[in-house]
Image (cartoon, helix red, strand yellow):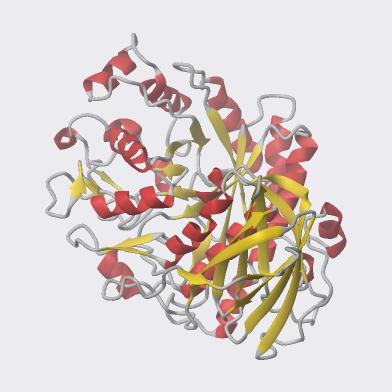
Amino acid sequence: MMLAMTERLSRRDFARTGAAATLAALLPQGIFGDSAAKRKAVIHADSEIGTVRPEFHGHFAEHLGSCVYGGIWVGPKSPIPNIDGFRQDAVTYLKELGVPVLRWPGGCFADDYHWRDGIGPAEKRPKRVNIHWGGYVEDNSFGTHEFVAFCRLIGAEPYFAANVGTGQPREMRDWMEYCNQPSASALADERAANGSPSPFAVKYWGVGNELWGCGGQFRPEAAAAEFRRYAVFAPTFGGTRPYLVGCGPSGNDTRWTHGFLETLAGGRMPDGYSMHFYERGALPPEKFTDGAMATQFNIFPRVEQAIVQQRALLDGYDPQRRIGLILDEWGVWDRIPREDEQQRGRLWQQSTMRSAVAAALGLNLFNRQADKLYMCNIAQMVNVLQSVLVTDGPEGPRSVRTTTYYAYLLFKGHRAKTALKVETDGPKPADFNPAPGQPEPPPDLSLSASRQGAEMVVSLVNPRPDASMDVECALRGASARRGTAQILHDSDRNAANGFDHPDRVTIQPHQVAVDGAGATFRITLPALSVATVNLELS
């Protein structure tokens, strides 16, 4: 986990991809303009993009702060209500959310983690120092068996990040056999003796994490050479072919991708290719100003540009798109007060109404770029950075669903549907590359849509704090019989679901009007809101 670097596409390059919406007009100059706004949008039901993979809603959990210990895991002897040591509320809430995939154990922690430390009787597991996140002593009570059991409880596919930084190919190879070989080998027998006779059938394996940074500070050519070496010793065990994920760039670092892919050209390519992109914030989570919020929101068009450009680079080496582009870590990373970390653990971060809007901006762009992506994992699941749950630690019984949790819940209906082309009359992503001396346009209406049979789901985001939006959305290639809507909204950008007010910001019913011909619907989006419209099509 590191701050992502960005590179900008030219307007001409980005427009050539066809990813940007065709727009009618730009907003006035300045960060925020008029106090009322009317917006027009078009959904092209006959112009399909690709499948909204459930994996776009993936998650990430690292041994960092109170994400695992006190967030997910409290231990079977804890007075906190738990299921075999897993915090009961967390299991309940995450099952409701429907987590498709969960990446573990890092993050930076992965490249100093040795999997054998986390198996066998808990009381005999060695204690290790977490060198990356505060030097606390890790007791390894949460290891491979616990992680897989947690994934099964919440219905998630496990995704392991293997150790390249301080590990060797043999270590990853043995971990694969331990997890996936059904029987008749020493490692399979050891897994059975440790309580799991059936194999885990783990499909996803990351070959290192952030090898350009905390994973070893490799150059891309050296990182690719490590991937090539590890891949030789990553066979299929028990019928589960490993899906190997190569370490891609921080942000839109095209030099890294060129160097990595050029080194592998003609040989074993990765099944997936990861990139990390954080939307940094300059202020503490609950103290954002309008200007700081606008700056953070304006990073999202650059994320979209990065996805387009990185996919294009991959296509140059893999025109059949057998390599899946994975946004392995993403989310808002605000400036975290020292006192919050001292009280609740490293990188403990509250999620606010601003955070929910940011999550929705990301989820919308994943839908719009559905043909270019394979998986996206928000960082991180509980307590750390842009989490969907916050808890009051190893000794505290309280668990709260954050505003980001509810943003994800609003987007759940898109999963497995086909994303559709949309247009709005706000600024294009390419317009966030202004000429020198010219201001960037302010954040504006964000939209995505998907369809399956007679059901269409439309998600809309108003990221402005100063103006509601009356949105008129036309349907092309389809007509609607009726529609319903839900909304997540609070006029205070810093509003949050805290331990004393856990339900301040939750999903509420909302009004949507479908015209008599079914060709248009109208909806009003209050300032700082996320809405989802469900349409029944004729």
Is 279 above or below relative to 324? Answer: below
Looking at the picture, tell me which residue is in the foreground, 113 or 485. 485
Residue pushed farthest top? 184
Q: Which residue is painted at 22% across and 29% down in the image?
A: 120
- 40 displayed left or right of 467: right
Q: Position of residue 59 (x, y in %)?
A: 46, 49
- 400 displayed left or right of 431: left
Looking at the picture, tell me which residue is in the foreground, 122 or 301. 301
Q: Which image quadrant for residue 55?
A: top right
Q: Which residue is painted at 87% across and 61% down in the image?
A: 12
Residue pushed farthest front? 516
Q: Which residue is painted at 31% across and 13% down in the image?
A: 186
Q: Which image quadrant for residue 26?
A: bottom right
Is 342 above or below relative to 166? Answer: below
Q: Can residue 4 be seen at all in this image of the molecule?
A: no
Q: Position of residue 300 (x, y in %)?
A: 64, 65
Is 18 above or below relative to 323? Answer: below
- 21 displayed left or right of 182: right
Q: Position of residue 99 (x, y in %)?
A: 44, 47
Q: Position of residue 303 (x, y in %)?
A: 65, 59
Looking at the picture, tell me which residue is in the foreground, 267 or 453. 453
Q: Can residue 247 be seen at all in this image of the molecule?
A: yes
